[in-house]
Image (spheres, coloured by chain):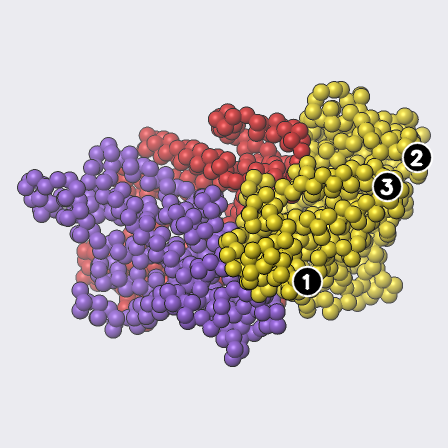
């Protein structure tokens, strides 16, 4: 595995760069208060809407706040939402898929019909309604996003279980009298881990995309003074109306969104090549 | 004679309309021909039925299609239009309007007092379910009729004959006359509405009496008007008006700069572009009868202590608002906005950080120590956010108190205000009619908009008295006293500023009337002399 | 085949019912009602308005009324646009949305074919890498960013495109914005599907028999590789639908998606539900079409 990873790094510079970028963004988000050159809040009457300069590398916004600082803090929101949603969906979806695939028959049929229904939903619309209901905070957006993204994991997990459960070692475990839970967790789950990991890697950028879109439309997370930052999507929305005269306010946050999503996608591609060479 | 004219008119109208629609499809682009004036409405008007419309977009269309009994003059006093004169009788409890005889509907019929009676009763009819029904509740039996308790014939509005409209009020109300300028009191045609139902506002059905006629309503896209050749005050100078619905400010502005739109108002001018635009010749600030304030939840700690409220009020430097919002906002320490009777800039608490700190110390929070965590909420909107973040900074600097900010989507916010307002909350108020009564009543103990639940019986009493006082000088003195209680003594609210709108007009034109209640009137628009070239 | 169709149709109806129920319930629990105003309405005024729209009835009665209306094709009145019904509004706005979606899809299909085939034909060469890179970029670029970028370059800087909907050329930038993501997805899928087919036995046989390489690629491989692409059309429509709602917002296009946002903030319950249901119906139809096509190509599918 480690050798394969090394080969992958050397084979694909994009994979390596993406990996470094994501690690960097994570560190930056985590240590944002220490790294930021300015406080995230407050307003500087004298320094409104400055273009990038020596003092403010990425310029300032309509209240004279340092844009770099706001983007550093924003990394927390985007990453937290992306990773946590994906993990939440992974947990719920995998469990659902495992049970469905393992049980088979009528139960499987019924459970999969529900998944089909979820697939038929216009998910962004449902997401908007749900997040309004759950509140415009991180937890609300997380749950709303989780609600529409778990089905992907359920399908992947079920498909894998169907393939795996007929395999010899599973049959063996069953013959030896292992409990269902034991078979599922100890024998089946480890063997379907790889495709789930790939799906997870692709779910993170999808969640970041959905969250930033919601914020851009003006319905996202916005609480600039808590220890959380303002979402990159909200920063982009701030810059949208002033795009004509002050393009830097929209440029840098959108660049951050784009690069982060891109990195996760490259990472996902690389992982898929690595774990499932057939798919290349 | 008039009947015959009307009949031929009606036969003539459909062919005229189809002619216009056919030709209006050929879109004019680039620079206008000087005969078509193009404005941006911003969004689709929700309704062109003036009994049901509630928003300024709809009213801005209606105001160009219709005229009523009166209109505002330059000093915001009702001036005659369809009513040539009126008498106030019975100590202010009875109003009699005398109507002109030469006002015609677009189908040729005469406008009569009965059209007003019908319209007002339709507004009050429970089946109409109009949101503005309560505006006429000062009329005898109006409220009872609206509740379905009595028949409409007992309501105190009556057409005595074709040119006399009599209105009986429950009590003297000096502000009632101003209501006759409001679009909801414009006349309506029973025959048209009963014939076409909800479709009566479609261009092929609608019957109007104002300077322009509705020729096209392409939903989500544009509305077209043409000059009414038979308008009794004279045909407008401009032949055609196109009201576009360009929702994106950036797009609308680009179209203005490319000469494809001639007039933009607040809905089309991005805040951050204002510094650049304000240097253009067509740019203008129009002060509005609209105030913004922060309210306190006075029934709970820590803002149940007036000293704390005063301290917070005195720690706000209002002079930064026009710099941040760039809209020519007028900082205000008192509540009744400039341009309105009884506006008094000398009332209120001015910026004074040392005094604010002293008051806070007295209240038990020296340098903000021990002050509980409080939240300031506002509804999601660019301007509100900028103001909130600036005020937060000032309170932290001057009082040592860091408030938390929270923004909520508009409907959620309204709901929260009514049920459980946060310790500090943002609110605003725009005039329905330009009378101080409309503004000060907001904080009466019985007012549904008194979100902070402040009660002061003296304040209520003054309002009661002022509402019936017909002598203007005495009224002003009463309102001064009320404002002192509100803004200096009890301080349940901190007025921040009076809103100013920005407009951009193509410099080739003159004559757009954009008033202090955001109403846009186009009947006097014309090309500047020599402006037709180019 | 008829039974299969019927079953899929019944399933489509179930999806519609689920969406109707979910949105109906969600809207009623959202804080704030359609007639909450800054100028708070007196209770008697509110009572009359609620009576007009039957909002004074119990929740289940309202739900039953709505479903009954829906069954007969009545989407109800709009609370905000008082003179018009939801059906009127949908009829006015849906053409713009569909027009945009069709152009975007056409653009995506036209572009993904050459890209996908080129990438597979020159597998692991620079052309392949470039195509994969392009596709990954496309997948990673959110609609609103691409839209803003295009507006900034072409409308604001260069002044080439008039940004207003309805003028000639105004559909181009939004269609490119909307089509980018599906195009990237399709390219990706087509490439991997082609690669898989090219490794299959019958291709090897064809090559061994000396069939020209271009013929192998276009006649044998491409035809077989299009089947998996077909399955993606369903999710693709979902992407287009979600995207159209953002693109309409960014480009101020008077389509249905833009209405959704304002209807939600206005709490115009019937309008929100109407728009959501129409979108769902579009998805259901798309999936149904894919199912039918698929079952024609691969009869084994019918038993599912």
Q: Is residue B380 visible?
A: no
Q: For the residues labelled 2 and 3, say whether their Cβ atoms are less than 8 Å apart.
A: no
Estimate the x, y position of residue C64 in percent, counting from the top left.
49, 26
Between B392 and B226, the one lying in front of the other is: B392
* Residue B60 horizontal side relative to residue B525, left or right: left
- Residue appearing at x 67%, y 63% in the figure: B352
Q: Is residue B170 visible?
A: yes
**Do discs 3 and 1 share a chain?**
yes
Colour in which chain B is drawn: yellow
Colour in which chain A is drawn: purple
Q: Is residue A56 above or below residue B517?
A: below
Between disc 2 and disc 1, the foreground one is 1
* Residue where numbered disc 1 is placed: B351
- Residue appearing at x 67%, y 50% in the figure: B491
Colour in which chain C is drawn: red
- Alpha-carbon distance for marks 3 and 1? 42 Å
Q: Quadrant of residue B210?
A: top right
Between disc 3 and disc 1, the foreground one is 1
**Quadrant of image for the N terminus of chain A:** bottom left
Q: Is residue A271 above or below residue B169?
A: below
Q: Which mark is residue B87?
A: 2
Q: Residues within 10 Å of mark 2 (few under 14, many from 20)?
A: few
* Residue where numbered disc 3 is placed: B70
Estimate the x, y position of residue C288 in percent, counting from the top left.
38, 39
Helix, strand or loop for disc 2? strand
- Alpha-carbon distance for marks 2 and 1? 47 Å
Between B483 and C61, the one lying in front of the other is: B483
Helix, strand or loop for disc 1? loop
Q: Which mark is residue A44?
A: none
């Amino acid at each position: 595995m480690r050798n394969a990873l090394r080969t992958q790094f050397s084979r694909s510079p994009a994979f390596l760069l993406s990996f470094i970028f994501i690690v960097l963004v994570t560190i930056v988000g985590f240590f944002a208060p220490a790294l930021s050159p300015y406080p995230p809040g407050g307003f500087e009457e004298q320094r409104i809407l400055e273009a990038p300069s020596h003092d403010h590398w990425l310029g300032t916004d309509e209240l004279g706040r340092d844009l770099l600082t706001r983007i550093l803090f924003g990394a927390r929101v985007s990453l937290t939402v992306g990773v946590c949603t994906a993990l939440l969906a992974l947990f719920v979806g995998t469990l659902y898929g495992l049970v469905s695939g393992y049980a088979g028959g009528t139960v499987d049929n019924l459970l999969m019909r529900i998944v089909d229904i979820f697939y038929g939903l216009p998910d962004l619309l449902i997401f908007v309604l749900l997040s309004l209901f759950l509140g415009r905070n991180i937890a609300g957006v997380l749950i709303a996003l989780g609600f529409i993204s778990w089905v992907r994991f359920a399908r992947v997990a079920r498909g894998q279980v169907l393939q795996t459960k007929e395999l010899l070692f599973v049959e063996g475990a069953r013959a030896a009298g292992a409990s269902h839970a034991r078979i599922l967790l100890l024998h089946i789950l480890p063997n379907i881990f790889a495709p789930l990991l790939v799906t997870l890697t692709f779910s993170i950028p999808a969640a970041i995309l959905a969250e930033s879109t919601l914020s851009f439309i003006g319905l996202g997370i916005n609480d600039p003074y808590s220890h959380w930052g303002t979402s990159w999507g909200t920063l982009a929305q701030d810059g949208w109306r002033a795009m004509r005269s002050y393009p830097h306010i929209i440029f840098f946050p959108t660049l951050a969104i784009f690069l982060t999503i891109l990195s996760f996608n490259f990472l996902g591609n690389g992982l898929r090549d690595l774990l499932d060479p057939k798919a290349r | 004679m008039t009947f015959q004219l009307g009949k031929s008119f009606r036969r003539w109208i459909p062919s005229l309309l189809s002619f216009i629609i056919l030709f209006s499809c050929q879109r004019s682009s680039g620079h206008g021909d000087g005969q078509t004036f193009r404005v941006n409405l911003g969004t689709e008007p929700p309704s062109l039925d003036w009994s049901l419309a509630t928003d300024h977009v709809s009213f801005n269309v209606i105001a160009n299609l219709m005229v009523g009994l009166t209109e505002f003059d330059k000093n915001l006093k009702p001036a005659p239009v369809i009513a040539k004169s009126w008498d106030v009788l019975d100590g202010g409890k009875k109003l009699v309007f005398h109507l002109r005889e030469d006002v015609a509907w677009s189908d040729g019929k005469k406008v009569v007092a009965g059209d007003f009676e019908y319209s007002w009763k339709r507004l009050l009819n429970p089946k109409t379910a109009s949101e503005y029904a309560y505006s006429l509740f000062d009329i005898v039996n109006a409220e009872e009729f609206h509740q379905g308790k009595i028949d409409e014939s007992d309501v105190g509005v009556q057409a005595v004959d074709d040119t006399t409209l009599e209105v009986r009020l429950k009590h003297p109300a000096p502000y009632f006359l101003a209501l006759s300028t409001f679009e909801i009191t414009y006349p309506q045609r029973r025959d048209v509405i009963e014939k076409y139902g909800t479709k009566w506002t479609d261009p092929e059905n609608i019957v109007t009496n104002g300077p322009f006629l509705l020729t096209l309503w392409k939903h989500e896209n544009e509305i077209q008007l043409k000059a009414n050749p038979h308008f009794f005050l004279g045909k407008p100078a401009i032949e055609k008006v196109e009201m576009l619905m360009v929702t994106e400010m950036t797009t609308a502005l680009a179209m203005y700069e490319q000469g494809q739109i001639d007039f933009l108002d607040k809905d089309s001018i991005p805040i951050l572009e204002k510094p650049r635009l304000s240097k253009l010749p067509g740019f203008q600030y129009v002060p509005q009868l609209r105030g913004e304030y922060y309210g306190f939840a006075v029934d709970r700690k820590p803002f149940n202590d007036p000293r704390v409220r005063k301290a917070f009020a005195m720690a706000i430097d209002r002079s930064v608002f026009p710099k941040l919002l760039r809209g020519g906002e007028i900082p205000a320490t008192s509540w009744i906005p400039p341009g309105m009777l009884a506006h008094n800039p000398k009332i209120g608490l001015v910026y004074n950080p040392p005094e604010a700190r002293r008051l806070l110390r007295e209240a038990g929070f020296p340098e903000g120590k021990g002050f509980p965590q409080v939240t300031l909420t506002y509804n999601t909107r660019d301007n509100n956010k900028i103001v909130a973040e600036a005020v937060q900074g000032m309170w932290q600097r001057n009082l040592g108190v860091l408030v938390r900010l929270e923004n909520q989507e508009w409907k959620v916010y309204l709901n929260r205000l009514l049920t459980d307002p946060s310790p500090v909350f943002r609110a605003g108020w725009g005039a329905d009619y330009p009378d101080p009564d409309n503004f000060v009543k907001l904080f009466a103990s019985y007012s549904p908009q008194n979100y902070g639940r402040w009660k002061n019986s003296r304040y209520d009493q003054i309002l009661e008295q002022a509402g019936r006082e017909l002598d203007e000088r005495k009224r002003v003195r009463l309102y001064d006293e009320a404002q002192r209680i509100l803004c200096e003594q009890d301080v349940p609210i901190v007025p921040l500023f009076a809103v100013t709108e920005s407009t951009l007009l193509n410099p080739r034109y003159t004559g757009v009337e954009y008033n202090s209640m955001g109403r846009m009137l186009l009947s006097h628009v014309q090309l500047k002399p020599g402006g037709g070239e180019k | 085949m008829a039974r299969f169709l019927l079953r899929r149709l019944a399933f489509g109806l179930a999806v519609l019912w689920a969406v109707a129920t979910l949105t109906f319930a969600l809207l009623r629990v959202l804080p704030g009602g359609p007639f909450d105003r800054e100028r708070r309405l007196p209770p008697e005024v509110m009572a009359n308005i609620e009576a007009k729209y039957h909002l004074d009835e119990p929740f289940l009665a309202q739900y039953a009324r709505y479903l009954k209306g829906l069954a007969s094709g009545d989407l109800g009145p709009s609370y905000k646009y008082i003179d018009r019904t939801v059906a009127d509004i949908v009829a006015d706005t849906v053409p713009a949305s569909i027009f945009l979606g069709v152009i975007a899809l056409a653009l995506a299909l036209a572009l993904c074919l050459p890209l996908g085939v080129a990438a597979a034909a020159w597998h692991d060469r620079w052309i392949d890498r470039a195509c994969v890179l392009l596709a990954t970029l496309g997948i990673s670029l959110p609609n609103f960013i691409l839209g803003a970028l295009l507006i900034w370059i072409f409308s604001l800087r260069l002044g080439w495109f008039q940004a207003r909907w309805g003028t000639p050329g105004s559909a181009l930038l939004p269609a490119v914005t909307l089509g980018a993501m599906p195009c990237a997805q399709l390219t990706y899928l087509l490439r991997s599907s082609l690669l898989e087919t090219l490794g299959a036995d019958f291709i090897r046989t064809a090559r061994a028999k000396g069939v020209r390489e271009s013929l192998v690629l276009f006649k044998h491989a491409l035809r077989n590789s299009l089947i998996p692409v077909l399955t993606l059309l369903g999710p693709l429509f979902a992407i287009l639908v979600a995207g159209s709602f953002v693109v309409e917002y960014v480009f101020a296009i008077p389509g249905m998606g833009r209405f959704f946002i304002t209807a939600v903030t206005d709490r115009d319950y019937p309008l929100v539900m109407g728009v959501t249901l129409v979108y769902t119906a579009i998805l259901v139809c798309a999936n149904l079409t894919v199912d039918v096509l698929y079952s024609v190509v691969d009869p084994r599918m019918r038993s599912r």
